[in-house]
Image (tube, rainbow, N blue to C red):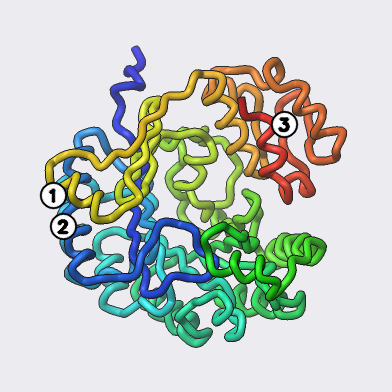
Amino acid sequence: MLADPSLQPITSLYVHVPFCAHKCTYCAFYSEASNGEIINRYVGAVIREMELVAANLKPHTVFFGGGTPSLLNLRQWEQILQAMERLNLLGAAEWTVECNPATVSADKAALLRAYGINRISMGVQSLNETLLERLGRIHTREMVFKSCDTLRAAGFDNINLDLMFAIPGQTMSVWRETLTEATALGSEHLSGYEVIYEEDTPLYTQLRAGQFGVDEDLACNMYEELVTFATDHGFQQYEIANFARDTTLTSAPRRSAAKVDQPSTLNLPSHACQHNINYWRGGSFYGLGPSATSYVRGVRTKNWANTILYCEQLERGQRAIESREELDPLARAGEIAAFGLRMNMGWQFEQFQQIAGNDMRQEWSKEMNQLVEQGWGRIDPQGFKLTQPGLRFADSAAALFLR
């Protein structure tokens, strides 16, 4: 007899670290300038939140995002990692920590590696000094190269580099130079993001003030260049903006993603980010820290996007949850369909029905045919996926599936 899925532990954990040395001009994520006293208080609070969910958690993937998690000092990291060890939360097959180049040290890298962190995602964004300044980044291009060397020396063999395109003032020539230098660093993963102008960010204010314009054609061409360049340099695109190397023929196979709601038969490159795949395939996860979202057994919760309030709630021994939401089955299936279409492979109909409990051919036949007619989708007897033009505008395509 199969075990009741509702009694199985959650296998995916996200921890939000909201602190930054400096707020970037484009960033709309919840983050704040670092403050030693508040960070210490946050560390105590996030450990308390871990204690409240640990009995229901057996991480297969862990992701510390931010903010800038690598901004935490050695003592603060030791407190968190020792607590995770005490709570039996170590040993994830994939454990990612986001880093900024200006915050990586040999001692910190060695500590993270010693506790089982095996993947680093580095916020490079650009290797052009002028563009780094435009984005409000505090690191230099030289810090990127030095940080990569530091991480390799500590034993990290799975590094992602985040890059941005369509930055104000960025030409195609500069974008190609960045791609050339980034791929030369030999990372196992690349993520490429178009600049998005979110309200309440300095970059949005500058755009509205007419300090620069937006060239949609150039942005599209830069995206196409990213796909072509990455593919030509040994990466496989598996999601709109994510590219990974496949080393299965030259190294031991990685654990399958089956425990994160992924059939083990999916043909994914070996260094694809399993944590993110869990999101795109509708898996459950715990999100800890200020502003973090969880999806556990059909219920979505969101923590307060306020570090002080978050800490106060946890210091009283309770979760710092601002809102709860339980979608009806069809609405949730539509969300799962939309997120899954971000991946190149799209959805196999049987796989989708197994995960979401609905048949795409019945509920979304009209929408799929509309996308096929636009040249944004491709349908066959086994499934549906977006074409390369469709992936470029995946948000618009995916919106058709929401109920």
Q: Quadrant of the N terminus?
A: top left
Give the amino acid type for the residue marked by disc 1 in the picture: Arg
- Residue 342 appears left or right of 307: right
Q: Which residue ends up furthest to the top in the rendered image? A: 1
Q: Residue at x 66, y 64 (%)?
A: 234
Label 3 neighbour load within 10 Å: few <14, some 14-19, many 20+? many
Give the amino acid type for the residue marked by disc 3 in the picture: Phe
| CB contact under 8 Å: marks 1 and 2 | yes
Residue 228 visible? The answer is no
Give the amino acid type for the residue marked by disc 2 in the picture: Gln
User: Residue under circle 2?
Assistant: 82
- Label 3 sits on a secondary structure element that is strand
Q: Quadrant of the C terminus?
A: top right
Residue 323, position as x, y percentages in the image: 36, 35
| Residue 259 in the image: above or below residue 42 | above
Q: Residue at x 66, y 70 (%)?
A: 209
First-in-chain label (2 vs 3) = 2
First-in-chain label (1 vs 3) = 1
- Residue 281 appears left or right of 60: right
Q: Residue at x 58, y 56 (%)?
A: 246
- Label 1 sits on a secondary structure element that is helix
- Label 2 sits on a secondary structure element that is helix
Q: Residue at x 34, y 40 (%)?
A: 286
**Residue 384's mark?**
3
